[in-house]
Image (cartoon, rainbow, N blue to C red):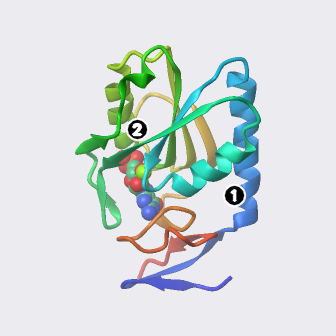
Amino acid sequence: MEAITLHDKHFSPYITSDEIKTDVKKLAERLFSDYGHTTPLFIGVLNGSFIFMADLLREYPGPCEVSFVKVRSYSGTQSSGTVTEVIGLSDRVKDREVVLIEDIVDTGNTMVALHNIFEGHEPAGLKVATLFFKPEAYKQNIPVDYVAREIQNQFIVGYGLDYDGLGRNLPHVYKIIES
Ligand code: 5GP
Ligand code: MG
């Protein structure tokens, strides 16, 4: 694996697709052991979660339903910290066991804002699962329910995550080289 350039920034290899595959499988097994007796509704948070969601669901061995919402909260490499829009949220969450699927939890602002909005739609249960979690950046008090992998407090791309639109299709994950 070699360093890459997206727009004006350089990134070095950080997590391989094989490592991610192992993390995703473990998380699917944890979710199944907690939700296998129900039919959970997994809701992916677009755009970043689309690849994670596709892989996670193919590792999830039980009945489940799938949906997506889209939020906006981030521009460039700095979290703006506010959810400005939630698109695609339907009333189907009422009385359902809902698991929000995030690509990455950084400050946690997006997760908490989404959590509060979903609570208002009266799910039977509401949990959050994330592929990546930055403990050093996290500013909230509530724990993140399911974390596949903790990472350093650095900006990453690949496996669904972008830098200003580029990098989502990379199978491996790269971290920014600070200059
Ligand atoms: P938070 O609200 O937790 O600070 O940020 C959440 C959102 O910011 C994530 O869902 C993701 O879209 C974006 N984000 C946070 N950290 C990173 C990162 O390291 N790389 C990329 N590409 N996006 C990130
Ligand atoms: Mg996201």
Q: Nearer the viewer, residue 175 or 32?
A: 32
User: Is residue 66 visible in the rendered structure shown here?
Assistant: yes
The answer to whether residue 83 of the structure is visible from this angle is no
Q: How many marks?
A: 2
Going by the numbered disc 2, the residue's amino acid type is: Met
- Quarter of the image where one finds residue 141: top left
Residue pushed farthest left? 84
Q: Amino acid at mark 1?
A: Ile
Closer-to-camera residue (118/143): 118
Quadrant (top left, top right, bottom left, bottom right) of the C terminus: bottom left
Residue, x 55% and y 43% (percent of image)?
130
Crowding near pointer 2: few (<14 within 10 Å), some, many (20+)?
Answer: many
In this picture, residue 100 sits left or right of residue 33 = left
Q: Residue at x 77, y 53 (%)?
A: 22
Q: Which residue is mark 2?
A: 111
Badge 1 local density, few (<14 within 10 Å), some, or many (20+)?
Answer: many
Residue 38 location, quadrant: top right
Under 8 Å from ligand 1: the CB of mark 2? yes
Residue at the image position 70 percent from the left and 23 percent from the top = 34
What residue is at 53 percent from the left and 84 percent from the top?
4
Residue 19 as seen in the image, left or right of residue 41: right
Mark nearer the N terminus (1 vs 2): 1
Which quarter of the rendering shows the N terminus? bottom right
Q: Is residue 51 left or right of residue 138?
A: right
**Could you tell me residue 162's position as x and y percent?**
44, 67
Residue annotated with mark 1: 20
